[in-house]
Amino acid sequence: DIQMTQSPSSMSASLGDTVTITCLASQDIGNYLSWYQQKPGKSPKLMIYGATNLEDGVPSRFSGSRSGSDYSLTINSLGYDDEGIYHCHQYYEYPFTFGSGTKLEIK
Amino acid sequence: QVTLKESGTGILQPSQALSLTCSFSGFSLSTTGICVSWIRQPSGKGLEWLADICWDDGKGYNPSLKNRLSISKDTSNNQAFLKITSVDTADTATYYCARGYYSSSDYWGQGVMVTVSS
């Protein structure tokens, strides 16, 4: 199975800050990487697909990037609504797998 | 408008079989490129992909569940199904179904809670 090592597991940032969450894939997954935001008691919401493509309706403050096997989600100008858990997800090869999640708290 | 809704047995005893139904609207599982996945999440933990079924009846399974999974679809009635045999307490989770269209799952259901307890 492809392991997705996500970091950090949790973080706290202030309004207006910029934060970056990363996922390291254990083998090549090309650009078959997506990012989800999940709020308490809700289903995950697709934010980024294809490593760098912004899902329709997602603010442009969110961006995805790739450097080799490292994938990053960057959020600019943090707002309270960005609080939640972020999951990376590889859909390159069965079984599809998720990172362990990053809990983002806004101070 | 794309919507999905999961339904199934809420409480089971160990060794029983879990049957889940995903009822959806706004798309068809006969459309090229469409797949429906099942993902679960134990309370307070991460997401685990279980299986998917696609427009061409292709199927994928997570081998970590050791052949306990069976996925199927009813295209005419816009439903997908997942069966998990021989459940135990580790199968207690919220189960989601989600649609993918040539890409990562973009629409998810609200999830259904399943508890396995003796």
Image: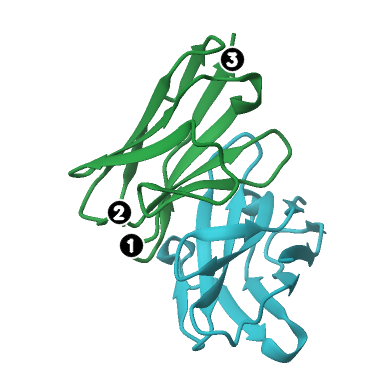
Chain colours: A green, B cyan
Q: Position of residue A90 (x, y in %)?
A: 38, 54
The residue that disc 2 covers is: A2
- Residue B71 located left or right of residue B103: right
Amino acid of disc 2 = Ile
Category of crowding for the residue at label 3, using alpha-carbon neighbours closer than 10 angstroms: few (below 14), some (14–19), many (at least 20): some
Q: Position of residue A94 (x, y in %)?
A: 37, 66
In front: mark 3 or mark 1? 3
What is the distance, in whole Å, between disc 2 and disc 1 at their CAs? Answer: 9 Å
Amino acid of disc 1 = Tyr
- Circles 2 and 1, Cβ within 8 Å, touching? The answer is yes
Q: Identify the mark nearer the N-term, 3 or 2.
A: 2
What is the distance, in whole Å, between disc 3 and disc 1 at their CAs? Answer: 32 Å
Q: Secondary structure at mark 1?
A: loop
- Residue A20 located left or right of residue A16: left
Q: Identify the mark nearer the N-term, 2 or 1.
A: 2
The residue that disc 1 covers is: A92
The residue that disc 3 covers is: A106
Q: Position of residue B103 (x, y in %)?
A: 45, 64
In front: mark 3 or mark 2? 3
Q: Secondary structure at mark 3?
A: strand
Badges 3 and 2, same chain = yes
What is the distance, in whole Å, between disc 3 and disc 2 at their CAs? Answer: 31 Å
Residue B36 in view of the camera: yes
